[in-house]
Image (cartoon, rainbow, N blue to C red):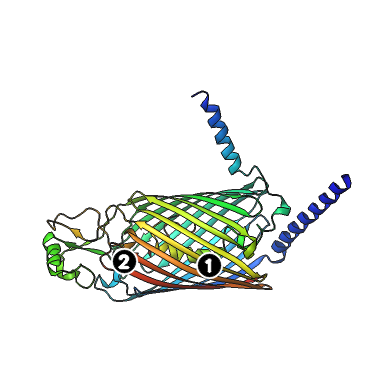
Amino acid sequence: MRVLSPLLRCLLAGALLGAAGCATTKPWQREKLAESSMKPDGDPDREVLRYHMLGTREGAIGGFGHGGGGCGCN
Amino acid sequence: MRLQLGRQATLVAAVAITLLARDLASAADEPWRLSSDTLVYGDSDNVVVVSPQVAVRRSLDDGGGNATARVVVDVVSAASVDVVSQATNRFSEVRTEVDLGLAKSFGSWLPSVSYRHSREPDYRSTGLGAGLEHRFADSDATVAVNYDVSLDTVGYVGTAEDTFSESLVSHAANFSLTQVIGPKALVRGVYTLSVQHGYLEKPYRFVPLFDSAGIAAAERDGVTINLSNFDDYRLPERIAEQVPDARVGHALAVRGLRYVEAIHGSIHTDVQFFADTWGITAETIEPGLSWSPSQAILMGMYLRSYLQQAAEFWRREYVVDDPAIVPTWRTLDRDLSDYFTATLGARLEWQRGILSGYVDLSGAITAYNDYLFLNGRLALVGQAGLRLDL
């Protein structure tokens, strides 16, 4: 267990570093990321309407788009 | 070599300054955005909803800070099986919602607050929210945490609030991480914890009861009990819907986006899992693609599949031996049942100077596996919007 613990710690640290973007993207590499088709969030005013409609038709709550509460239609 | 490095550095700096200057210019030159949207929903279950919306957005800084105000009205007209199975006629109602939001960046931190109020004849809701976003790793990674609380009052149309009024409190906490994975891909993960406590029923829903003799009679007649004949086989009693007062849900969602040179656009996929303390589980998958045939036009297509497993207490028919002893939990809410929805949609976005807009059309088909009043539903949704950047 004592042998594994440092290894596990390293793996965990590696995963966290990976998730934290240890290999950064340079500004001149961001051309494609700046394209409108690459926006992780769509137009907020469009999405809020769409997810409100989905929220009234789907039983799940949360994740992308819609949370609980807000109207009696669900 | 030294000269080459110097030229490269100059080129990089020039590109970086150009990109930065463009971003600054966009925030400084067009700080105001006026938006107008309309969503129209219609389905084969005789429900029509028209939702016009207007919004104004003022950019406050280049780190995502802004002030927003939004008003949306839902005009609902329904003669669905939910309505007619309760021996009532088509109803129409209007819901009005106002949203206000404020976010201001401080370096790489972006705190935000929001307020929402909505009102309809038998439902009132007030929501408050707060969030904090942090960019790091040269803006390759963004973490965000949001908390929203919604305080709702459930009423009954035509009845004074002091005669019938129930409350519902909903909490939702979101944790998300968005990570750039190289020059052409990014991924986002979201976890939502939702907690609802209070009145989660609909006061208009009364659940029909059956006994084993009624079920046997239907079998003897060779019919499946449904909307057209359930009155022939049910017991005289119909009891008010009753579900647990607390519901805790967990949602985990992942979104992947990748740029594809061949189509001058991107492909994306959303995958989402949901489970709650009522025993409901749901899986959502939404793949899609977007491409730009020209600089001013963006087109897209998407699929969405939603598969849900019913709440533990869901029954197609609630069968009792003694009408005086009824199930503690009983519901007619089909959103708590087993069902599957498949949606196919297409979107067109365009921009011309300070004016931009979009049109989104989709069709959805739903199959209910175990719902007394309905086997399926076909829905058509149209949404369009205009943006004016000043």
- Judge from the rendering whether residue B206 lies leftward or rightward of residue A36; answer left or right: left
Residue type at numbered disc 1: Met
Q: Residue furthest front?
A: B262
Choose the circle earlier in sequence order: 1 or 2. Answer: 2
Question: Do we see residue A63 in this rendering?
Answer: no
The chain identifier of the residue carrying mark 2 reads B
Q: Position of residue A33 (x, y in %)?
A: 65, 57
Q: Nearer the viewer, residue B97 or B1?
A: B1
Can you identify the residue that label 2 sits on?
B156
- Judge from the rendering whether residue B236 lies leftward or rightward of residue B362; answer left or right: left
Q: Badge 2: how crowded within 10 Å, few (<14), some, or many (20+)?
A: some
Q: Position of residue B373 (x, y in %)?
A: 26, 68
Q: Which secondary structure, mark 1?
A: strand
Can you identify the residue that label 1 sits on?
B301
Q: Residue furthest right?
A: B3
Whether labels 1 and 2 share one chain: yes
Q: Nearer the viewer, residue B335 or B9?
A: B9
